[in-house]
Image (cartoon, rainbow, N blue to C red):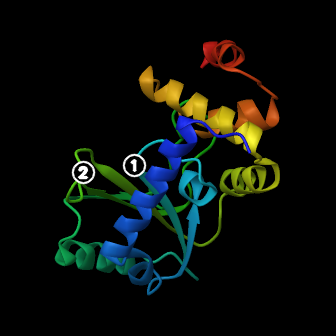
Amino acid sequence: MIKNNLFEKSEKFKADADKILKESDLINFLSKYGKVKPVGAYHFDIMMRGDIDFHIFMEKVDKEKVIDALNKLIGQGYFQAYMFDDFVKYSRLIKNSNDQFPYGYYLGLIVIPKGYDKRWKIDIWFIEKDSLSGKKYYQLLKNNLNEENKKLILELKDYKIKNKLDFPSTIIYDAVLVKGIKNINGFIEYIKDL
């Protein structure tokens, strides 16, 4: 197994995420609105920052139920900031990508838990089904993530954060798992045209 300090950093983020989810009882709460599916870096143990992603599958996306969830989360008082986006009525492309945000409603939660000095963001998508892009990246990571490319993904995420680069992590997943990029220099060349 390839281990380095980035693996330890990622494991610490995952442990902190689990603590936040336990303290807030968020997964149990969200399960009242649909089937909860953790996705992204949290699900695949490739976290390099305080960001947790969930898809909540509803039989039919229901704005009133999502607003009810938002109001109850506000009433709970665990989180400090809340955001609501309507991607049913207003579709939008993802920055630096040809993909669109999923058809559904988005809740963003911000928390700075006790004992932490940085904020955590939780992205919650209330959707009927995964977008083609969502399915693609879930399967890509599920089928191709191994210790070697996990190490490179963590290095590239660290590079992205340190250099304050603004693009979705899916750019990194494509570079490593589809294009076969093997190092940071190859990645720098790959993203020149973004």
Q: Secondary structure at mark 2?
A: loop
Cα–Cα span, label 1 and label 2: 11 Å
Above or below 51: residue 155:
above
Which residue is found at the position 63% from the left and 40% from the top? 170
**Residue 152's quadrant in the figure?**
top right
Which residue is found at the position 72% from the left and 58% from the top? 135
Above or below 194: residue 29:
below
Residue carrying label 1? 50
- Left/right of residue 160 with respect to residue 43 in the rendered view: left
- Disc on the earlier residue, 1 or 2: 1
Above or below 78: residue 123:
above
Tell which of 38 and 148 is nearer to you.
Answer: 148
Q: Secondary structure at mark 1?
A: loop
Tell which of 57 and 1 is nearer to you.
Answer: 1
Classed neighbour count for the residue bearing mark 2: other residues with Cα under 10 Å, few (<14), some (14–19), many (≥20): few
Which residue is found at the position 39% from the left and 70% from the top? 21
